[in-house]
Amino acid sequence: MARTVSKTEIYVGYTILIFLVVISGGILLKQSQYNPAIFKPTTFQPENPTLTSPPASSQSDLMQYAPKSLTALTPPEVFGPENLSDKINGKAELYLSAGFVGLVSQRFAIEDEPTAWMEAFIYDMGSPRGSYAVYSLQKRSDATELDTGDFAYRTENALYFVHGSYYVEMVASVAQERMAESILAFGDNFTRKTTTGNEAINEFLLFPTKYLNKGSISLLPSDAFGFQQFDSIFTAQYEMGDTELTAFLSQRQSPAEAARLVESYTSFLREFGGTELKSTLNIPGVKLVEIMDTFELIFSRGRILAGVHGAENRKAAEELTLMLNQSLAEKGQ
Amino acid sequence: MNQRAQQHTTNRRDFLLRLLKGGISIGAACSLSYWLYDAAGPGVAREEKNLVTLPDFSLPSLKGKMSIVTGVDRTETIRRALNALGGIESFIERGDKVLLKVNAAFATPPILSATTNPQLVAEVARLCYKAGASSVVVTDNPINDPASSFALTGIGEAAKSAGAKVLVPKKSFFQPTTVSAGVLIQDWPILWQPFQKINKVIGIAPVKDHHRSGASMTMKNWYGLLGGRRNIFHQDINTIITELAMMVRPTLVILDGTSAMMTNGPTGGSLSDLRQTNTMIVSTDQVAADAFGATLLGKTAANLPYIPKAAAAGLGTADYEALKPIRLNTA
């Protein structure tokens, strides 16, 4: 005997079917208008972009750091990782790869001289390593070192410094002394009013100091020397007579990881035409590769991955490698 | 209990009927899916009636022309560079409607050379009018706030002082385009409205380092015509620059290498990022102009993958010497 179906069941069934047809129609309509230029995958974006921008509201008002000589020219602008490129375009990737969290920027003008203006950029890089990375990678070579914040320098029209996890740029529209004094005062106010953690970057101390080009230490956050597995690599420039050399080191999670990276970087160099040579250095596991008329020396010591990159002079490279190994030993690595 | 069990029993006839209905439902769903399936994917199989295409603004008779003038004064070097190619009158005729595509990407001061120099914009606009142009329009779709960018770069004021009209982009100015030989610019919004009734286009760009592409010069300058979420193209920067050069065939390009941004581009920030390279380049071949511009940054065309790529696509030559550029020195 067949089961009878009640009218209620029929109505409910039709209602569900109509509902599904409406949903299908909506999807078809939306899909027919798809355009990647305007499509935004909202599931990957915060509901409120400002939530990803860490500077608190009180810090977003940069007027609090401005000396009396400056007056606000424009309101503050806030950017997060999702829209940083709207401010700095192609340079955004540099910041994003170094852990960028948020940016607040604002323009100020000299009170009685509106054509003389400057823009302050306060980048929150999430950590002192992040802020040091973007600072060191953009550092101007002919700059004047200052003692504002942790690291600082000025050029004819600008001031750049690191304060904890903040990287700060102040760029002026004119190169004049009055403006320079104003941006220095702004920088001092910022460092005085902004508290930071005590996280130190220990890698600075691991490099040997002899022949070291002071102020040349950089932090490459990713893809160092074109090798994808090389992240968080510190480099330092050395001048040994007429020879310029680049030493590098990186603290890894474990001795095993450091040793594995020595092998994988050596393989990477061989893959791109490098020739592995026998090294006579008394450093366990050291690798020497000649590639495109330059020499690469790589070794690990405990959790530290270290070496010399792109040296034109093998003898000098080996000498620096020994110095680096010795320095690591002396500093308990 | 037995009666309830009997009610739920399905006989052979009911079973076959339900099987048939189920089969028809599944078959209908599959047929519908097959009918709706878009093998070409989104964006490609769109109706093309709404797409716009920029006309070819180049002058066939002036193909492959190039001049390189050294000097510190932009108004002087641009005049000499144009005169070397027969004067602005060779490119602009009486009644022409000219569009100057400048680089106003950032709301930064002209001293930083991150944007087109305002004096140069004013001078080119003046020369166009002198040659008989009936209108000169200056436009760009800046990265930063458009109004601030045109104001703070000085381009807006300079253009107006020369009688040019500044078109600050609005949402309604954009229309989708597709570059037929491209893969990235497919149904993508471009700054279309300023090109209405225009018959001559001049690109004016500074020579800059660029974090992603290695350099930003005349071809990269067309990036400022893109709308939408254009920053996604940074993932394939060399292809997008090549496609931009396919999209825009200008009457001529002006590459300002008076003060080149050697480092920390495209924004720069410090005067120490700049070097006085004191060179003005005018060319009807944008690939050649960029190939020469690369040398001002201490690079070669081969160092910038989009240049050989554009040359291979037939958009110009990377061997700028083959054009026998006219070289002058105003010093």
Image (cartoon, coloured by chain):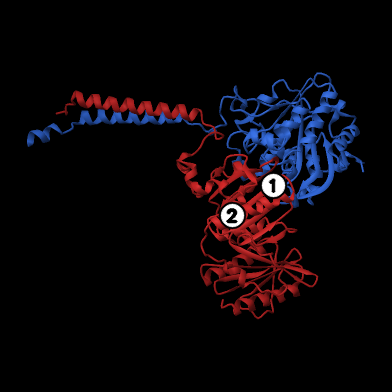
Chain colours: A red, B blue
Instruction: Please tell me whether residue A254 is drawn above or below residue B31 in the rendered image.
Output: below
Q: Which residue is mark 1?
A: A172
Determine the residue positioned at 62% across, 52% down.
A186
Label 2 to label 1: alpha-carbon separation: 17 Å
The residue indicated by pointer 2 is A189
Residue A164 image point, x, y percent: 56, 59
Image x and y of residue B6, in percent: 11, 33
- The answer to whether marks 2 and 1 mark residues whose Cβ atoms lie closer than 8 Å is no
Residue A291 in the image: state x and y as whole percent.
72, 65
- Same subunit, tags 2 and 1: yes
Is B283 above or below relative to A29? below
Q: Position of residue B43 (x, y in %)?
A: 56, 32
Q: Chain of mark 2?
A: A
Residue A178 in the image: above or below residue A323: above
Q: Nearer the viewer, residue A264 or A247?
A: A247
Who's the residue at 50% across and 28% down the image? A32
The tag earlier along the polypeptide, 2 or 1, is 1
Residue positioned most to the top: B95
Q: Amino acid at mark 2?
A: Asn
Q: Residues within 10 Å of mark 2 (few under 14, many from 20)?
A: some
Figure disc tally:
2
Q: Is residue B311 visible?
A: no
User: Looking at this view, is A24 or B248 the one in front?
Assistant: B248
Using the rendered view, name the quadrant where residue B115 is placed: top right
| Of marks 2 and 1, the one in the foreground | 2
